[in-house]
Image (cartoon, helix red, strand yellow):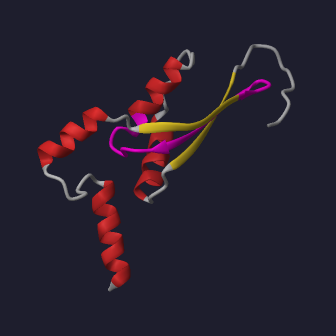
Amino acid sequence: MLINQKLTRDLMAMKGFGGMGRSDARTTDRARPAGEVTFHEKIGAHDVSVVRVLDTRRFIAWVEDYLKKAGVDNPLIPPPLKLVVKEYLRDGFEWFAFNVVELGTETVTKEAV
């Protein structure tokens, strides 16, 4: 019984039913970003960011916008990967790591992080 109550409460919170009214939720949505960068560092060829999810409904769009602002040419997330991210979000994962590496046309070796 306690497990079911916790799961229901967690799922409701993830879907935006965290106890506030509809208009309050929309106002809060606009006021805060869908993600928060908690770590960012360029390590050799790697541009590493760790991000915490703040709003599951807007997170994928926020990631694409974040990557665009970071200088990624075409930061569109492919549909199969979006499905995986949505599944992680449904499962309650709220931390993601991004490792952006610039690729050229030549075969080269990059040092691992």
In magenta segment, residue 80:
no
Image check: 51 left or right of 62? right
Vertical relation: 52 (above or below) 15: above
Image check: 14 left or right of 112? left
Task: Give the quarter of the figure containing the N terminus.
Answer: bottom left
Over which residues does the magenta segment extend? 42-60
Vertical relation: 69 (above or below) 90: above
In magenta segment, residue 48:
yes
Q: Nearer the viewer, residue 78 or 56?
A: 56
Image check: 22 left or right of 80? left
Q: Position of residue 109 (x, y in %)?
A: 87, 26
Residue at the spot 13% in from the left edge and 47% down from the top edge: 22
Q: Residue furthest bottom?
A: 1
Rendered image quadrant of residue 4:
bottom left
Residue at the spot 45% in from the left edge and 45% down from the top edge: 53
Residue at the spot 84% in from the left edge and 27% down from the top edge: 110
Residue at the spot 30% in from the left edge and 77% down from the top edge: 5
Q: Position of residue 38 (x, y in %)?
A: 56, 39
Task: Give the quarter of the figure containing the C terminus.
Answer: top right
